[in-house]
Image (spheres, rainbow, N blue to C red):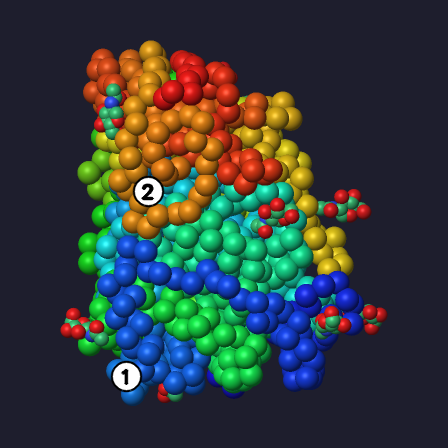
Amino acid sequence: MRLLTHASLLFLAAGSLATAAPLDDDPTLLLRDWASLSPLRRQQQDNNATAGSYTGPYASGGAWTDAYSQAKALIAQMTIEEKVNITTGHSGPCAGNSGAVPRLGISPLCLQDGPTGVRPARRTSQFPQEVTMAAAWDRDLAAERAQGIAEEMHDKGVNFWLGPVTGGPLGRSALAGRNFEGFSPDSYLSGENSFASVRAAQEVGVVTVAKHFIAYEQETFRDAYSPNQTVIDASGENYQRVLNQLPIDSQLDDRATHEAYMWSFAEAVRAGTGSVMCSYNRVNDTHSCSNSYAMNELLKGELGFQGSVVSDWGGTWSTIHSALAGLDLTMPGQGYGGIFGDFFDGSLIDGVQNGAVPESRLDDMVLRILGPAIHFQGNFTESYPAPTFDINDVNGPTNNVRRDHYKVIDRIGQESVTLLKNNRTLGNHYGLPLRNKKDISSIAILGEDSGPKIHGYTSCGDFGTACAFDTPPGQNGTLSAGGGSGWSYPPYVSDLLAAVSFEARSGGFDINSDTDSYNLAGAAAQAAKSEVAMVSVNAYAREGSDRQNLTLFGGGDALIEAVAAVNNNTIVVIHAPGPVLLEEWVDHPNITSVLFAYYPGQEAGNSLIPVLWGDVSPSGRLPFTIAKSADDYPDIQRNYSLDPSVYFEESTDIDYKLFERRGVEPRYHFGHGLSYTTFSFDSLSVQYNYSADSTSMQKTNEHFDATYGQGDSVYDQLLTASVSVTNEGSVAAKAVPQLYVTLDGVHNLRGFEKVLIQPGETVKVHFSLRRKDVSRWSVKRQEWYIPDGDLLFQVGKSVGHLSTKATFAFTANQ
Ligand SMILES: *[C@@H]1O[C@H](CO)[C@@H](O)[C@H](O)[C@H]1NC(C)=O
Ligand SMILES: *[C@@H]1O[C@H](CO)[C@@H](O)[C@H](O)[C@H]1NC(C)=O
Ligand SMILES: *[C@@H]1O[C@H](CO)[C@@H](O)[C@H](O)[C@H]1NC(C)=O
Ligand SMILES: *[C@@H]1O[C@H](CO)[C@@H](O)[C@H](O)[C@H]1NC(C)=O
Ligand SMILES: *[C@@H]1O[C@H](CO)[C@@H](O)[C@H](O)[C@H]1NC(C)=O
Ligand SMILES: *[C@@H]1O[C@H](CO)[C@@H](O)[C@H](O)[C@H]1NC(C)=O
Ligand SMILES: *[C@@H]1O[C@H](CO)[C@@H](O)[C@H](O)[C@H]1NC(C)=O
Ligand SMILES: *[C@@H]1O[C@H](CO)[C@@H](O)[C@H](O)[C@H]1NC(C)=O
Ligand SMILES: *[C@@H]1O[C@H](CO)[C@@H](O)[C@H](O)[C@H]1NC(C)=O
Ligand SMILES: *[C@@H]1O[C@H](CO)[C@@H](O)[C@H](O)[C@H]1NC(C)=O
Ligand SMILES: *[C@@H]1O[C@H](CO)[C@@H](O)[C@H](O)[C@H]1NC(C)=O
Ligand SMILES: CC(=O)N[C@H]1CO[C@H](CO)[C@@H](O)[C@@H]1O
């Protein structure tokens, strides 16, 4: 079977050999695999769902009623078989292919990974990972990135982009394997980026699939699993396979649900995302993809979501129950040899015929799938490109879709790189920016991460995992992206050694390099004879497993220490998915600068050059907190059980909020990042300034207490805040003033802007605050409300350094 030689097996199989869903804790339902489940038994379970009682919500189309009318006209002509065909995945050239209705001219829809570009496909770009994007703190740039990805999706013939990652995972634990695929553990920062990304991508005509809904916060036990079975996949890796364990169950409270985990999805929904992907995990005891409360109540009810819910690949556990619970499209369905179970298809035809699922619900499923496709791509009589690639033959002929996207990739690299430490005590020959390249005598470039991957990036395979650093000896090379469905093939990767070598042509310096991180003596010898020593190190993360620790990979710590011992101008560059521990060396007096470059995509080395030489002042800011110890973050649930659960005991206190609540001092605060100048923030003022929501593409149904303020939407602007930002230094640079409001005793990011300020100049920066931004969620009343009394607002350069404040109290007549 071709599938078994396909590297994608790792994650597909990791999607589970789905068993029909145990709806309760009855251990007899923990069956070994779906095939051993008798059809009768499955039928029983399905019938035990809410059969006959389905009352919606049904899609109206919202702002897309024209397209929905066209879709309804088509659906009215379809047989039950044809409708069900559309709701079930098929084999085809794409990661997911919906069924066609040839009789009515409806072609299959192509659904394709992923968050950094078209995957797996060639002649595409590898964009910066979302965490890198978030570090740029720039909504316009986030839109440009999403536009670029969507253009490549469109030109490859992809209808549905399986992205952006929209707060699932959000990042409650810094150790979660997929955090880098998302923007930030801060729900506001994630939400702003999600909104910009969805809107920009869909303007290109590609339907976005915001994922993964909801509370999907770890890889460990995300799939049914047995410690007794090991399977070796095509990449030669061992992994645990899928038998009789239930996926991890995330148990969370209602405030965390609304204030933390739904926030960014709400932004994606009001930006008009045409689709949302439900996640592998269980939520509050029930599989996300058959969770009526999550899909029907929260997503389609409270958020008013009009589009389709598509299962993660293998995330479907039942047919009737899932269809009634709000799942619209099951993936990959018959694809991949049907290894994930035969959900939907014939069992849904039967279910509709025997009345278990009302036909109106089947119509709604099809409407939700076709409606957004018609709205954004035309009604199938118009031309949308057919797929020009085939995931089953990645090396076949295909078109180049890269346009000039290297430019935006490069710019995101420059705008995100975060200067954590810069010690200029000894003058401008030390630290960053480097002095004139004609004057420097020598630069050492050290560490495996600064060089090329010795067997090339294609050796990493379709998921970027075959050359993983966690399967020693690894293959070296710049770590430009993490592994899993969030990886994509780069056309090339610019590494630091090549990029700095290019500068040496017009500079006066020699390069002394050693890219074997384990050759400490060699690296030290090169460093000792160089004016500047740059050490590039990394940490790997990927889908399918969580990080075991927050330590640098490939002997990074030892290498840095060996270099710093002999060179008094040591500059460290880090490629990492999120927090790494810096404690062993960060205070070393010879380490003059530390640059955090995240996972920057194909332009990794190039994007550092303007920052190194000061043509661009660093303006990246940490989108997460860097702790002094891994114990400062909540842990992943790794305790084996057939029915594993994780309790989100910290509730809404994620990342910096948890540090604050517990009084733990981090190494670097959320929002931290140095510049080549200094900024001051003064004269914060906050005033009432109502303005009706004009940005939502689709309206949500979120309720609120109307005691304070005008308007009928939680997205109406109620306040504006203004602050003066002054560039006190001698170079033009971008500032990132951050606005926090204190709610429930901790800071909450609620505004940021990125502004270029000339030396000596003062700029007035305005923040728009919506009702939701100054509200909390009432569990009892199930609505947003503005707390009584003074609200405290603060602005500064990070959550740990807030320098100006103002208060505002609503009065009942506002
Ligand atoms: C279905 O529900 C009936 C009645 O509540 C119960 O006896 C039976 O065990 C359930 N079956 C399954 C498979 O959950
Ligand atoms: C499909 O779109 C075309 C072109 O916009 C239009 O002429 C046609 O009437 C539409 N078909 C339906 C069924 O609405
Ligand atoms: C269902 O979809 C498949 C795959 O696109 C297609 O080959 C088949 O003809 C469709 N079946 C019906 C009944 O339209
Ligand atoms: C693993 O295998 C052992 C010995 O064969 C067996 O006792 C145990 O129940 C198995 N565990 C699981 C989770 O299947
Ligand atoms: C989880 O369960 C709690 C308690 O019943 C509920 O308040 C909360 O909204 C649920 N969250 C989700 C995502 O289902
Ligand atoms: C950290 O975890 C990785 C695997 O994720 C492992 O290869 C490495 O040895 C661990 N390092 C330490 C110091 O435990
Ligand atoms: C710093 O580097 C110098 C060489 O420039 C070396 O002599 C010194 O020992 C180093 N300092 C430390 C603390 O390692
Ligand atoms: C740093 O090291 C260089 C090269 O060894 C040396 O010339 C310089 O004086 C040192 N700087 C300080 C402040 O010690
Ligand atoms: C900054 O550099 C000076 C001079 O080398 C040194 O004394 C001091 O310890 C350094 N500070 C840090 C935080 O590394
Ligand atoms: C795992 O089990 C250990 C030992 O019982 C316990 O101390 C720890 O809290 C558990 N971890 C989690 C995340 O539940
Ligand atoms: C009030 O809000 C509007 C819309 O956001 C904005 O254009 C205007 O500048 C604001 N006025 C003040 C005084 O901040
Ligand atoms: C850090 C790392 O993976 N280094 C490897 C680089 O490649 C050489 C040659 O294969 C290995 O020996 C190193 O272990």
The residue singled out by tag 1 in the image is 104
Q: Which residue is at a point 26% across and 65% down the rendered structure image?
A: 67
| Dot in front, 1 or 2 | 1
Say left or right for 80 vs 53: left
> For this rendering, which residue is in front, 780 or 683?
780
Of the residues under marks 1 and 2, which one precedes in the sequence? Answer: 1
The amino acid on which the numbered mark 1 sits, given as a three-letter code, is Leu
> Are the residues at dot 1 and dot 2 in contact (C-beta closer than 8 Å)?
no
Which image quadrant: the C terminus?
top left
Which element is circle 1 on?
helix
> For this rendering, which residue is in front, 243 or 538?
243
The amino acid on which the numbered mark 2 sits, given as a three-letter code, is Gly
Number of marks in the rendered image: 2
Q: Which residue is at a point 60% across and 58% down the rendered structure image?
A: 281
Q: Position of residue 242 (x, y in %)?
A: 65, 70
Say whether residue 315 is visible.
no
Say whether residue 29 is visible.
yes
Q: Is residue 148 above or below residue 58?
A: above
Q: Is residue 235 above or below residue 631?
A: below
Picture quarter containing residue 507? top left
> For this rendering, which residue is in front, 754 or 806?
806
Mark 1 neighbour class, 10 Å CA radius: few under 14, some 14 to 19, many 20 or more: some
Q: Is residue 394 above or below residue 126?
A: below
Mark 2 neighbour class, 10 Å CA radius: few under 14, some 14 to 19, many 20 or more: many
Q: Which residue is at a point 47% across and 53% down the rendered structure image?
A: 301
Say left or right for 44 vs 713: right
